[in-house]
Every structure is written in structure tokens, then in C-alpha cells.
Image (tube, rainbow, N blue to C red):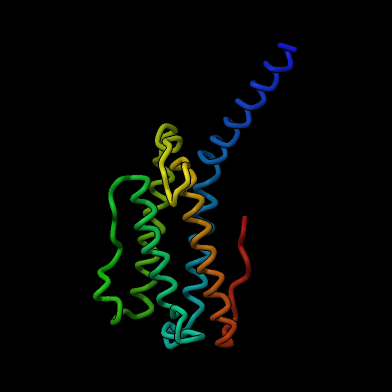
Amino acid sequence: MAVRWIALLLFMAGTNLHAQQYFEKQYAGVWERNLNYSKAVAEAMPEAGYDFRPTDEAMSFQEQLLHVADNISMLTSRITGDRKNFYRKEDATGFKKVDVMAVLDRANAYVLDLIQNASESQLNEEIEFGGVSMTKENIFYLLRDHQAHHRAQCLVYLRMKGVSAPGYVGW
């Protein structure tokens, strides 16, 4: 019986190690593909379409992308303790496509830097977010999920405007 418990504990320890190794060895590449895909979606929309919104209640294409950057600012502050702003909100109404893309690039590059420099102890640190206890590593997955959600909305906007959408990249 004791041998089974030891085997189970070793298996569980190995699973945790595998998950840690995944983040350290692969997640930066996952994030780079994520940011490149988001950039391709942002690039595909002609500048005139950046103000497009399918309904009065919906965010415009531009607002979707800036919301991603705002969310990166908020979520990364849960990792670092410091809230980084990637643009001045009062300037956003005058933004051109190139300005929005630069904001998105800065925000995504910041996350990539955090991923590449995250220590194991930082990743494993427990925090409370949205009433749920989680590790800081989970915030990095939340960042990707949130961006994918809004990128998908942007893909729908492209199709509604008759713009050819970039092919899917999900690995």
C-alpha cells in the first residue's frame, strides 16, 4: 500500500514539474504566435474600418484592440504590482491605425518580456483574482484567453466589412 502512495506522489510531482517546464520552455513561443496573430488581424482592417462597430452597444474595432492593451495593463499589475499604461486614454480618439497597432505591439512585447523573465517562485505565487485563488502563472493564461476572445470579435468585424481575415494560428 505504501508503494502505491509513493508512486502516486512521484507521479503528481512529475506532473507539476512538466507543467513548469512547459511554461519555461514553450510559453514565450505561444505568446509570440498570439501577438503575431493579433497584429495580423489588426493589420488586415483598413484604417477606415477602425471605427466600425456592428451595433451601437458594441466596441469599435479600435476599441477592441485598445481594450486588449488596457486588460494587459490591469492583469500584468497582478503579476508585477506595477500598473503600466501603454497610451494616454485622452489621446485615443485621435489615434490612427498605426497608433493603435503601436499600442498593441508595446503591450504584447511587455507581456513577452515578463514571460521570458518570470522566476519559478513568481509564477507559483498565489494571489486572489476575481474571488478565485490562483497562481500568477494563471494570469499569463488569462491574458492569452482574453486577447483571443477580443481578437475573435475583431475577426467577425473583418468579415462583416468584407475584409479577408488572416488564417488561424493557434499553436
Note whether 136 is above or below 35 in the view shown: above
Determine the residue located farthest toward the front in the rendered image. 131
Depth check: 130 or 46 in front? 130
| Residue located at (47% from left, 68% from top) | 39
| Residue located at (43% from left, 43% from top) | 116
Note whether 21 is above or below 110 in the view shown: above
Note whether 26 is above or below 52 in the view shown: above
Depth check: 71 or 130 in front? 130
Q: Quadrant of residue 62?
A: bottom left
Percent from the top left, x then y, of residue 112?
42, 51
In the rendered structure, the answer to whether residue 91 lies left or right of residue 105 reads left
Note whether 171 is above or below 67 in the view shown: above
Report how many numbered discs are placed on residues in the image: 0
| Residue located at (52% from left, 72% from top) | 41
Percent from the top left, x then y, of residue 61?
45, 78
Percent from the top left, x then y, of residue 165?
59, 77
Q: Quadrant of residue 64?
A: bottom left
In the rendered structure, the answer to whether residue 44 lies left or right of residue 86 reads right
Percent from the top left, x then y, of residue 73?
34, 58
Q: Quadrant of residue 158?
A: bottom right
Q: Quadrant of the N terminus?
A: top right
Q: Quadrant of the C terminus?
A: bottom right
